[in-house]
Amino acid sequence: MNVETINIWAQLIASIGVIVSLFYVAAQVRQNTRSSRAIVVDSLARSMHDLAIQMAQNDQLLTTATMLKDWNSASEMERARYASFMLGYFKLFENGWFQMRQGTLEREQWEGYDAFLRTVWMVPTVKTWWSMRRTFFAPGFRNYVESLEEARGIPSLAQLTRTEK
């Protein structure tokens, strides 16, 4: 075996090593992407859960968030609570919307958030609040929200809390 043959074999083995390492790196990137997606999905779910727990543990917040019927006749405190609460919800929705558009959140996962967003959006006081706070959100998300239609067959939060007689 001459030096030239040894050099060709060494280059071939090195090339195979590079290809194998590229497959390994690709597998690691794919695993990291899955982990990142899982973290985002968990973070969104946890944020939604935290807001729901706050409502469940605070009678005033629950009443303000679900039963505020008229923005103008509400007290300053009720409007302030409602505005803060809605800002939190809508920032969460905006985050989910961006994650879905980037492909981090699967469309199937977004469907639940979207249905809830549609339910919240149909409340007249939410639209009043939105008209005063819409500039707090990205233009694409604003357009998305403002084009929403009612989520058919899904009861409102107020309907869920009423008792039938």
Image: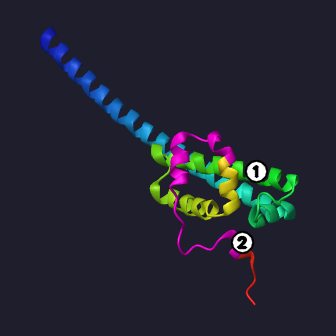
Vertically, is 133 above or below 163?
A: above
Vertically, is 95 above or below 112?
A: above
**Disc 2: CA contacts within 10 A as few (<14), some (14-19) or many (>=20):** few
Q: Judge from the rendering whether residue 17 lies leftward or rightward of residue 132; answer left or right.
A: left
Going by the picture, which residue comes out furthest to the front? Answer: 72
Residue position marked by numbered label 1 in the rendering: 83
Amino acid type of the residue tagged 2 in the rendering: Ala
Rendering coords of residue 44 (x, y %): 62, 51
> Secondary structure under badge 2?
helix
Q: Is residue 138 magenta?
A: yes
> Secondary structure under badge 1?
helix
Closer to the camera in the image, 136 or 74: 74
Snapshot quadrant of residue 164: bottom right
Pointer 1 or 2: first along the chain: 1
Q: What mark, if any, has residue 158 been given in the picture?
A: 2
Residue at x 86% of width, y 65% of height? 59
Rendering coords of residue 125 (x, y %): 71, 59
